[in-house]
Amino acid sequence: MMLTELKPNELARVVAIEGGHGLKHKLALRGIVEGAFVRLISSHGPITIEVDRNVICIGRGIARRIRVERV
């Protein structure tokens, strides 16, 4: 499933990032890497997630490229 399919407060683990080196690097700088745990905070407007106690907002286009599995 993709990150955009989670419901608020659901915890998931990043399984894969479907994109090129540039996208993977940009997300890695924010702590979003394969194996990281993310919690969806809000999906109204930009996708707001929590990663390692940091709150991050990303666009829906990027969120659709992040494959996750519920924990």
Image (tube, rainbow, N blue to C red):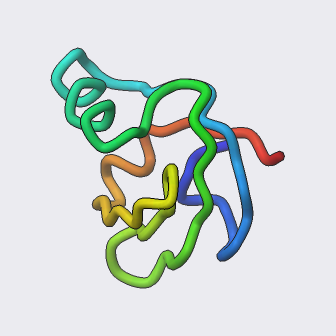
Q: Is residue 9 left or right of residue 48?
A: right
> In x, y percent, where is residue 3?
56, 51
Above or below — where is 10 with respect to 14? below
Of the pair 67 and 27, the residue shown nearer to us: 27
Of the pair 65 and 26, the residue shown nearer to us: 26
Q: Is residue 55 left or right of residue 30?
A: right
Q: Is residue 62 left or right of residue 25?
A: right
Name the residue at 51% across, 50% down. 52
Return the residue found at the far right. Answer: 71
Name the residue at 31% across, 52% down. 61
Count of numbered marks: 0
Name the residue at 32% across, 24% down. 19
> In x, y percent, where is residue 8?
66, 76
Above or below — where is 9 with respect to 35? below
Return the residue found at the far bottom. Answer: 44
Q: Is residue 18 left or right of residue 70?
A: left
Return the residue found at the far left. Answer: 22
Name the residue at 61% across, 27% down. 35
Return the residue found at the far front. Answer: 53
> In x, y percent, where is residue 6?
66, 62
> In x, y percent, where is residue 67?
57, 36
Q: Quadrant of the N terminus?
A: top right
Residue 30 position by quadrant: top left
